[in-house]
Image (tube, helix red, strand yellow):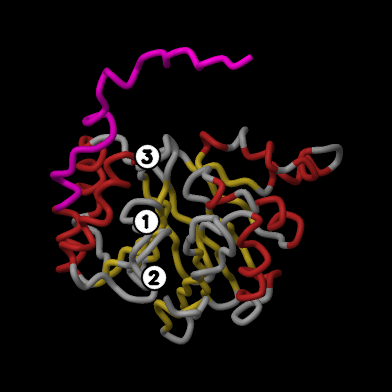
Amino acid sequence: MSKTTSYVLFDNGVHKCIVFTSLVQGEGIQANQFLIINGAEDAIIDPGGDLTYTPLTMELFKYIRLENIKYVFGSHQDPDIITSMPRWLMHTKAQIVASKLWARFLPHLNSAFTSNKMEGEWFDRLIELPDEGMSLRLGNSELYSIPAHFLHSVGNFQFYDSISKVLFSGDLGASIVGNPEEPVKNMQAHLASMRGFHQRYMCSNKILRYWVDMVKDMDIEMIVPQHGAPFVGRETIDQFLDWLWDLPCGVDLMEKRVFRCPEPALMYG
């Protein structure tokens, strides 16, 4: 994989979308982080945890000033998504945008902002997304929080930028073998690499079909997951949607034999 840690997905001179890759050092799973710039306002999507905070901040300095960050979006509650939240609250004036289902859990990450006089500020800076999602203004643009519940979190959102026509899809479409800087080209090989993850982590085919029905008519030119390579162009995106439509996963595949009390461990004197 290239050592490049950031590249531009879209740039029309006013509006930019930037992907950050390969920032995780050590054993942590690699994840993509995203920056959207419109004029003098910026938004970060799925910034990650302590493993990515410092390298991501260093990369951000190439493009923006931290005081211009208006939103930090979290698609769901996983450690590689939002556990760096306390640092963004301490070092920026950004609002945190996340599902209402996680609003009362996030303070567990954030003792500094939930103690004494800072408690009120923390809740003032939290935007709780309803299950139906919502849109938020960023400069002269709109960012849409798109429902993707149970794919794989019970309160899960994706984020759609109507100017670049990019859907930031979180873990849906994720693969650890694809290069984030190179769009998927061999679709059949890529689908095979995604199958195991999607069949275990996504809830059910019923939910996948709800999602496909929602996005198939949206004006999307690129789907960019949190891990691995993006899907670029309608032909590739439609192949991905067709695959999801027929994919059994999650509770569809879980067997009763798994649900049993384990045998006693051997005891040694």
The residue depicted at 26 percent of the width and 45 percent of the height is 211
* Position above or below: 170 against 190: above
Q: CA distance from mark 3 to mark 1?
A: 12 Å
Q: Position of residue 221 (x, y in %)?
A: 27, 70
Residue 169 got which mark? 1
The residue that label 3 is drawn on is 149
Q: Earlier in the sequence, mark 3 or mark 2?
A: 3
Predominant SS of the magenta segment: loop
Give SS at disc 3. loop
Query: Within the image, what quadrant is residue 93 found in?
Result: bottom right
Q: CA distance from mark 2 to mark 1?
A: 13 Å
Residue type of the residue flagged with mark 1:
Ser
Mark 3 and mark 1 residues within 8 Å of each other at the beta carbon? no
Q: Which quarter of the figure is the C terminus placed in?
A: top right
Residue type of the residue flagged with mark 2:
Pro
Q: Position of residue 40 (x, y in %)?
A: 60, 76
Give SS at disc 2. loop
The boundaries of the magenta stretch are 243-269
The residue depicted at 35 percent of the width and 42 percent of the height is 151
